[in-house]
Image (cartoon, rainbow, N blue to C red):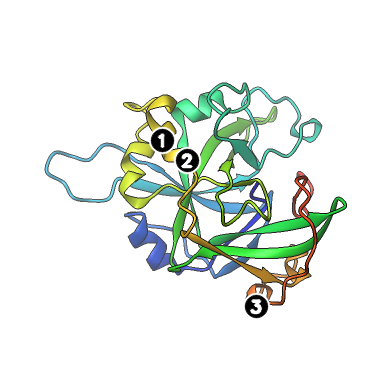
Amino acid sequence: MCGRYALIGTPEEVKAYFDLLDIANFPPLYNIAPTQPIHAVMAGPPREPGSNLPNRTSLLVRWGFIPTWAKNPKDMPLLINARSEEAAEKNSFRAAMRHRRALIPASGFYEWKRSGGKPVQAYWVKPRDGGIIAFGGLIETWHEPGGSEMDTAAILTTAANETISHIHHRMPVVIRQQDFDRWLDCVNNEPRDVADLMEPVQPDFFEAIPVSDKVNKYTNTGPDIQEPVEAKAERLDDEAGPPDQLKLF
């Protein structure tokens, strides 16, 4: 799963990496937690013939997907992730997988190794070469009974590769820069046409760095939560997840 992540690139770097016309300013985000606003990138209007202007748009969305049919989100589980193998068929995600695929800018994510059902070691998982990456995401706009709207998102996950599997059996889907157009083009590409983009990245793409339990609390938001520590030797428990989450609202 992906229950916490970071975005520590500058707005200018994110704008350039995703070929955006503009993006809202933001500080380094070291410990992004569910229900917080996150950046998402979607396809914009088609380019005019001969134009080289960016046609991708950035928006702030709530991390915690709410299906359009939900009456009261407080009665639902917090949908921060969607299994890529099932999203096209699941009632909650089917429409978004077909019509509202997105990219979630990130610098890496956190994962917890567990023992006896309890988190014993946190890891900061980042690209070996550093820089910004894009998680595959889904967007849905929920209309509350009072008439207001809320844009919400989930991060797609896939099977963990060899680098991550000793920590957890799932990891975020990573969409490569050369595949952005194909992933975001929901008019011409159905979910089956982009299924190959949701495979795990190669084992040497990420490195997993053990960090302290400071990251366990979403109120700890400084760069110190990424400082390496000596890993604890504990057995793997498949039911992993961040130990301290925000409530639904």
Q: Amino acid at mark 1?
A: Asp
Q: Secondary structure at mark 2?
A: loop
In the figure, 165 relative to 197: above or below? below
Q: Amino acid at mark 2?
A: Glu
In the figure, 89 relative to 233: above or below? above
Q: State left or right for residue 240 relative to residue 138.
A: right
Q: CA distance from mark 3 to mark 1?
A: 34 Å
Q: Secondary structure at mark 1?
A: helix
In the figure, 194 relative to 215: above or below? above
At 88% from the left edge and 52% from the top edge, which residue is drawn? Answer: 116
The residue lying toward the viewer, choosing from 217 and 174, is 174
Identify the residue position indicated by label 2 in the image: 199
Identify the residue position indicated by label 1 in the image: 196
**Image location (x, y in percent) of residue 88:** 53, 25
Q: CA distance from mark 1 to mark 2?
A: 6 Å
Residue 233 visible to an observer of this rendering: yes
Q: Tell me whether the residue at label 1 lies in contact with that at label 2, contact meaning CB atoms closer than 8 angstroms.
A: yes
**Image location (x, y in percent) of residue 146:** 69, 30
The residue lying toward the viewer, choosing from 152 and 226, is 226
